[in-house]
Amino acid sequence: MKKTKSKQNSKTVVIIGISAAVVIGITVLALNSNLFETNSISDTSKILTKSETQIYKDCTMVTYGTTNADVDCLGLGTLHLVRDLPLSAANVKDVTLTISGNVYSIEFIAPLGKVTYDLTNLTYDAIVYQELVKNFGEIKIPFGDVEKSVRDLKDSLKGVPLIVENIIKESSESVVIPKLKVPEINIPKPEPTKQLTLSELKQTTLEDINKYRTQNNLRSITLGTAISPQLYAEELLVEGCIHHVSVRGEGPMLRYKNNGDKMFLVAENIAGGLGLSWGVPEKDILRANYDMMYDDAHANWGHHDNILNPHHKSVSIGIAYDNQRLVMVQDFEQPLPPEYSYHPSSFAKQSMDQKFCW
């Protein structure tokens, strides 16, 4: 290994342990570039390449019946060469050796005529390397020029972030995002639930009652005209409770009498439900009728029996509601028999019965 030494404005680099192929490439570059300077080279003809040939005459070749052959030439020494096919054992004189790169052409005259074949050198790379080290020695690199090149490269790299930034900016400005028109979808607005009038609610109640009567093979009844059930429904709505005897002690018969309604034998159903904030009056009415028909065990099926009483001819209905509550009063009416005389207790005031408030 050679030492590395420094001089003013130059730096000496020693060739150490690189492959012959790479060294040859550097050699060509060194010989043809102004960047490199070489110390004196005595003889470049010994650098063996395919474009250069060397011819040695009067050589001696010894073969051993194998693929190996030793060729000895004056001024070259003994070369240990090989061939892919075995060679017969022999000791041949007056051999001409032509070297071109790693091709060693052998030529000699045999009894049957001229013989030629090619051999190769397994240590070719090492030979080339030794020749390079021997003949080129040290390669000088003008250090000042390298520093300048590095500085120029560094300065040129300073603009890279700005260039990239400009590319991104220009790209973003050049990209046009098409405006997508979202198709209009006409979603039909649900029609608000029709609010039935009070008369329509009473008619709905009557039809529902007659449905149950028809299902039980009973004749339909008509809608009565008494005002007592409507007045009482409005009274109970304000109170927020339902019960059959009013706060004044009036039962259904007494209310009919006091309000001037036509007299009947009256059987009464009262139901309570939720107001407009919670539902639709029509649905609450239908639900109340269903419960009185099929879920009336708690009232000993009294509401159920009033709906299906075969003697009833009509029903006067009162309905009142607000946002919180709904009250429905059904007074089923049975005509009085001829010359019917009321019992005095029918119009007597009564004690208030059980209330249900919500």
Image (cartoon, rainbow, N blue to C red):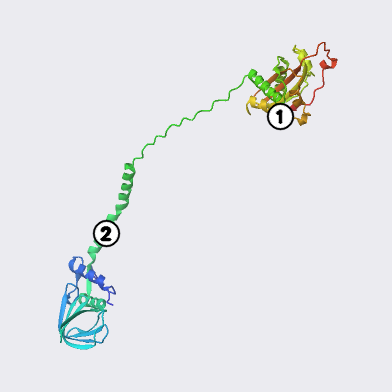
The disc at residue 199 is none
Image coordinates for residue 273, horizontal then vertical, percent: 68, 27
| Most foreground residue, 39 or 342 | 342
Q: Vertically, is 344 above or below 177?
A: above
| Most foreground residue, 97 or 91 | 91
Quadrant of the rendered structure where residue 182 is?
top left
Image coordinates for residue 52, horizontal then vertical, percent: 16, 74
Image coordinates for residue 102, horizontal then vertical, percent: 22, 76
Taking the image as shown, residue 192 lies to the left or right of residue 155, namely right
Q: Vertically, is 272 above or below 123?
A: above
Q: Which residue is mark 1?
A: 291
Quadrant of the rendered structure where residue 211 is?
top right
Which amino acid type is shown beneath numbered disc 2?
A: Arg
The disc at residue 151 is 2
At a point 16% along the width and 78% down the height, the residue shown is 54
Badge 1, how many Cα within 10 Å: few under 14, some, many 20+? Answer: some
Q: How many marks?
A: 2
The C terminus appears in which quarter of the rendering? top right
Q: Is residue 42 visible?
A: no
Badge 2, how many Cα within 10 Å: few under 14, some, many 20+? Answer: few
Image coordinates for residue 351, horizontal then vertical, percent: 82, 22
Q: Compute the Cα span from label 2 to label 1.
A: 98 Å
Which amino acid type is shown beneath numbered disc 1?
A: Asp
- Please tell me whether mark 2 or mark 1 is closer to you in this view: 1
Mark 2 secondary-structure assignment: helix
Taking the image as shown, residue 337 lies to the left or right of residue 290, namely right
Quadrant of the rendered structure where residue 308 is?
top right
The N terminus appears in which quarter of the rendering? bottom left
**Residue farthest toward the bottom in the current orientation of the protein:** 91
Taking the image as shown, residue 98 lies to the left or right of residue 269, namely left
Q: Is residue 346 visible?
A: yes
User: Which of the two discs, 2 and 1, labels the residue nearer the N terminus?
Assistant: 2
